[in-house]
Amino acid sequence: MTTYLVFASALFAIGAYGVLGRRNLLIMLMSLELMLNGVNVALVAFSRGLPGGSEQGQIFVLMVMAVAAAEVAVGLAIVIAVFRNRRTVDTSDLAGLSG
Amino acid sequence: MDPVATITAAVGTAAALMMVTRRNPVYSAVWLLITFLSVAVAFLHLSATFLAAIHVLVYTGAILVLFVFVIMLLNLQEDELGDEHPLPVRALTAIGATALFGLLVAPILATPEFAAPLPPAPEGFGSVESVGMMLFTKFALPFELVSVLIIVAMFGSLILARKRPLGSDT
């Protein structure tokens, strides 16, 4: 179980790097998925390995998956709208709101 | 050390690292696929069989296909990919992410209960029957609310991705 918890932490940290350290909107969205996946692995590991753990953790994961699917649909729609208007997926070129 | 767990975690982590460092999103999507599959193997190994199936269906079957579809639709050329952050910024972010990883791992490694071998799973743990039973009794309300969320997301993305703003074509 330790291995999977370390795996979950690694996925979360790598996803955090992708969200903060990259400027491509698509890759940032993928990294967001990676972070959610890390959380999912941790939830499943805890639901299986902790004494008194039950399948409630798996229900949580199902909810996270549904939210992730909704988030990706909206996020990619935003990416398409942004690209149509500005011809870029680079977040640093999208600074129209910074003073 | 469980060899299945170690190999799964190593493959998944390596693929995730490759994913965040690729410049072209198409390659990132392929590496992300490998990460998702290793997460599914982790679910299987943790006796969450139903979740593993759903994970493959939702993540590789829907989310990743959506990503690839959008990448295809945008058809990014090399000059449209944009620049990356300068190396010092990326190095600093990498150090920050590594620190975050250390922060998360330290308490995990310090807890001896986590290192104990897993007890055998109860009969039917993680099966469709037991997860579904819980989903439709104790968690029926959140389950129904998720459908509202998905409807809202569907309308939201339809309206966002429209070519013309709403009302301009009437």
Image (cartoon, coloured by chain):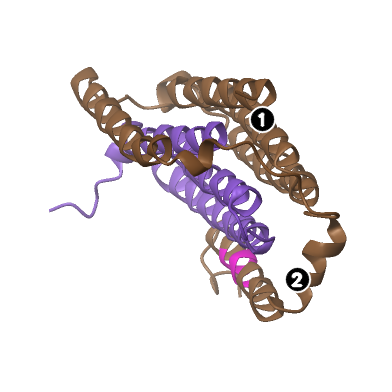
Residue type for callout 1: Ser
Q: CA distance from mark 2 to mark 1?
A: 26 Å
Residue type for callout 2: Met
Residue B62: percent from the left, percent from the top? Answer: 72, 46
In the picture shown, does residue B34 fall above or below A66? Answer: above
Is residue A89 something one can see in this rendering?
Answer: no
Residue A65: percent from the left, percent from the top? Answer: 63, 55
Q: Main secondary structure of the magenta part?
A: helix
Q: Quadrant of residue B79?
A: top left
Is residue A49 something one can see in this rendering?
Answer: yes
Mark 2–mark 1 CB contact (< 8 Å): no
Residue at the far left: name it: A99
In the image, which residues are magenta?
B152-156
- Could you say which chain is coloured brown in the image? B
- Numbered marks: total: 2
Parent chain of label 1: B
- Of residue B58 and residue B155, the one placed in the foreground of this image is B58
Q: Residue at x 81, y 71 (%)?
A: B133
Q: Residue at x 29, y 38 (%)?
A: A93
Counting residues from the N terminus, which is met first, the one under dot 2 or under dot 1?
Answer: 1
- The residue at which mark 2 appears reads as B134
- Of residue B150 and residue B82, the one placed in the foreground of this image is B150
Q: Residue at x 32, y 25 (%)?
A: B84
SS of the residue under disc 2: helix
Q: Is residue B10 left or right of residue B119?
A: left
Residue B80 magenta-highlighted: no
Quadrant assignment for the N terminus of chain A: top right
Discs 2 and 1 carry the same chain letter: yes
Residue B89: percent from the left, percent from the top? Answer: 21, 26
- The residue at which mark 1 appears reads as B38
Q: Residue at x 23, y 18 (%)?
A: B87
* Visual hue assigned to chain A: purple
